[in-house]
Image: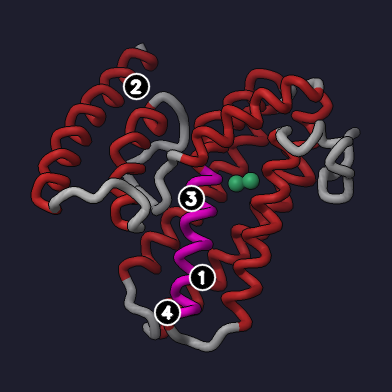
């Protein structure tokens, strides 16, 4: 049975652009940010670090759900079981972070929820590095891991950066809804194009309506 990817060299993982190496780099960054949050006293800087954790975790997980887990289900024995487990963790993180974003900093239950989210993120990282990704490494060669790495990275760079309870965990619904939601999130984060807010609101409402209908139609068609 293949071992964890935690201790392997970048070469063993298929090179720096392999999806395994990219995953491990992001996981290390999540760990660093969570440690930094813990080391800081309550205040603006700590809130900024929490925002960075959320943005990184959500874009990372969205790209997993649209690119990586479908690849695992296609190529790994028991891929369905393995990916259901990490999707469940993502759903719990999604629900808890949505709760955090509704509470103001300093609210008593907020800190406790942040700790629960951090524990779930660490669990998700361990399940991926120790259970899911070694199986993918066993099933694919380095060139295939690099191709998936490139696809995963391009989705990650344009993915939503906040929780959205209406988004399903699997394609095609998540991929379709991800487009308007990513735009909406990135404008909220101050990373996207600057347009007058009334124009933006109309644009997003129209786009979201259109894509929700398309996603629902695609899901209905798939179930028939
Ligand atoms: Fe991951
Ligand atoms: Fe994950």
Where 121 sits versus 214, above or below?
below
Q: Report the residue marked by disc 4.
A: 109
Label 2 close to label 4 by CB (< 8 Å): no
Left or right for 222, reference 36: left
| Magenta residues, dominant SS class | helix
Q: Report the residue marked by disc 1.
A: 49
Which residue range is magenta in the image? Answer: 45-61
Label 3 close to label 2 by CB (< 8 Å): no
SS type, badge 1: helix
Q: Position of residue 142 (x, y in %)?
A: 80, 24
Left or right for 64, reference 161: right
Of marks 3 and 2, which one's residue comes earlier in the chain?
3
Left or right for 146, reference 134: left
Residue at point 62% right, 75% down? 36
Camera-nearest label, 4 or 3:
3
SS type, badge 3: helix
Left or right for 50, reference 193: right
Where 185 sits versus 222, above or below?
below
Q: Residues within 10 Å of mark 4 (few under 14, many from 20)?
A: few
Q: Residues within 10 Å of mark 3 (few under 14, many from 20)?
A: many
């Amino acid at each position: 049975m293949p071992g964890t990817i935690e201790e392997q060299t970048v070469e063993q993982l298929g090179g720096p652009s392999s999806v395994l190496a990219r995953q491990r780099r992001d996981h290390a960054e999540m760990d660093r940010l969570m440690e930094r949050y813990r080391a800081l006293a309550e205040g603006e800087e700590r809130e900024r670090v929490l925002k960075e954790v959320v943005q990184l975790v959500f874009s990372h997980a969205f790209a997993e759900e649209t690119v990586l887990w479908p690849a695992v289900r296609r190529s790994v024995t028991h891929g369905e079981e393995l990916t259901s487990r990490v999707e469940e963790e993502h759903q719990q993180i999604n629900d808890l972070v949505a709760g955090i974003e509704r509470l103001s900093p300093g609210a008593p239950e907020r800190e406790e929820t942040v700790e629960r989210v951090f524990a779930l993120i660490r669990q998700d990282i361990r399940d991926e590095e120790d259970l899911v990704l070694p199986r993918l490494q066993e099933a694919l060669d380095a060139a295939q891991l690099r191709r998936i790495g490139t696809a995963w990275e391009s989705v990650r760079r344009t993915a939503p950066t906040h929780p959205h309870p209406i988004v399903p965990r699997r394609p095609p619904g998540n991929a379709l809804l991800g487009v308007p939601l990513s735009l909406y999130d990135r404008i909220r984060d101050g990373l996207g194009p600057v347009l007058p807010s009334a124009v933006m609101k109309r644009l997003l409402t129209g786009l979201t309506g259109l894509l929700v209908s398309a996603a629902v139609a695609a899901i209905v068609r798939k179930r028939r």
